Image (cartoon, rainbow, N blue to C red):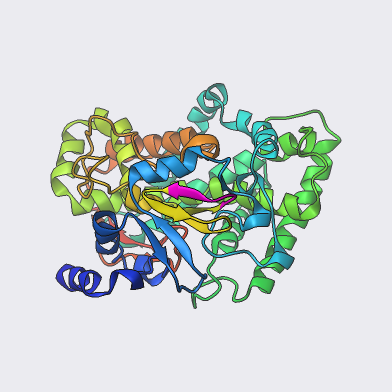
Amino acid sequence: MNDIAVLRDADRVALDDIDVSDPKLYQDDVWYPYFARLRREDPVHYCRASLYGPYWSVTKYKDIMQVEINHQVYSSASELGGIAVEDQPKDMDRPSFIRMDPPRHDQQRNVVSPVVAPGNLANMEGVIRERTARVLDGLPRGETFDWVERVSVELTTMMLATLFDYPWEDRRQLTYWSDVAIANVRSPDSPVHSEEEKFAELTKMAQALGKLFDERAKLPPKFDLLSMLAHGEATRNMPFREFMGTLSLLIVGGNDTTRNSMTGGLMALNEHPHEYRKLRDDPSLIPGMVSEMIRYVTPVIHMRRTAKEDAELGGKEIKKGDKVVMWYVSGNRDPEAIEDPDLFIIDRARPRQHMSFGYGIHRCVGNRLAELQLRILWEEVMQRYPTIEIMGEAKRTYSNFIHGIRSLPVRIPA
């Protein structure tokens, strides 16, 4: 579908009938005009009928921020529905600290946050750079290959194995479990095809990692996530389902944001050849460009909260128990907050002023690690390959939660 047809469709549908929770909008990459219309005509929009029941869409930067900072009213708690527009089946609930409110949220988050403290990131930089160089040096010249499989997945999987101190030869299991955790079971491409099958696979994950957790608990504390969880006062005695939920969160958090920014960023450069030239002329722009890539791609499409009491937002009356969905993809394209938001500009004046990592108490714990991995990738790419060409369409994930790219054919000129 061409851009004009998409715009026409978005303008033709009745405002009340707009449902931006449809995963097909993101798989087909046609979501932009629907959000542009909502920001313009109904920034806090009530969708009465969707696959996931009724929900509020919050589409403007300032309104999203208001929800993010007001966790006393807008709850992330698992027992109220959690963080996605789609409720997790109650009998398969998997709580984790992102699906908790303070004080439990703070206690558990504080256990794992040292793994991404500045000192530890500085220690990791050499290892990340050495691995990145090795992966890039192994890429073919003059022939088409899949950037997602050869670069994005491989680099993020290596990082996950390091964060968990997971057996190196089995590291692709972590990628598989990440794909299972975020899978939309309605998609024909999903690795699992029912919530029961997903729960069963994540149970296997928790059992495999649980053995390592038990081993680490008997050893002195180390600087990996399993050891931290095993020795943390707030996490050492987690119920099994909470352990499952926490592992899923840490694996997805350590994987999907970075993986999809690595791919989406290359696509953005190819779509904006002027910016690609700017980068070739001045590689010192890479740190700011990394933030712009994360904004432009917006790897996490939305986060959901549940109102704990009646509230007012953007002139609308939110009732206790209502689903309130913050669409980060829309906030990152709000012209009232970000100048020329639909353009990819690698030397923006304030590149980190985006909401891809969330805000407030739930701001992504690993945001600096994601930025570090992306910065090193582009520093190493530009030393080797001034141009990487895209050779065909990207295949996108059927999801309204993760902005996933499953494959991207590229070629490095010989």
Where is residue 2 shown, x and y percent of the image? Answer: 18, 72
Side of 210 relative to 344 (left or right)? right
Q: Identify the residue at image location x=36%, y=50%.
A: 315
Closer-to-camera residue (177/303): 303
Side of 235 relative to 85 (left or right)? right
From what the image shows, is residue 199 above or below residue 300?
below
Q: Identify the residue at image location x=27%, y=40%.
A: 337
In the image, farthest residue toward the right:
218
Q: Is 66 a magenta residue? A: no
Q: Identify the residue at image location x=58%, y=49%.
A: 309
Where is residue 355 shown, x and y percent of the image? Answer: 39, 42
Where is residue 412 shown, x and y percent of the image? Answer: 26, 53
Closer-to-camera residue (23/285): 23
Q: Is residue 403 visible?
A: no
Q: Is residue 95 visible?
A: yes
Where is residue 316 shown, x and y percent of the image? Answer: 40, 54
Side of 109 relative to 19 (left or right)? right
Q: Identify the residue at image location x=37%, y=56%.
A: 147
From what the image shows, is residue 219 above or below residue 43?
above
Side of 68 relative to 218 (left or right)? left
The quarter of the image holding the N terminus is bottom left
Residue 65, by quadrant, is top left
Q: How many marks?
A: 0
- Range of the magenta residues? 307-312
Residue 384, by quadrant, is top left
In the image, farthest residue toward the top:
119
Residue 4, by quadrant, is bottom left
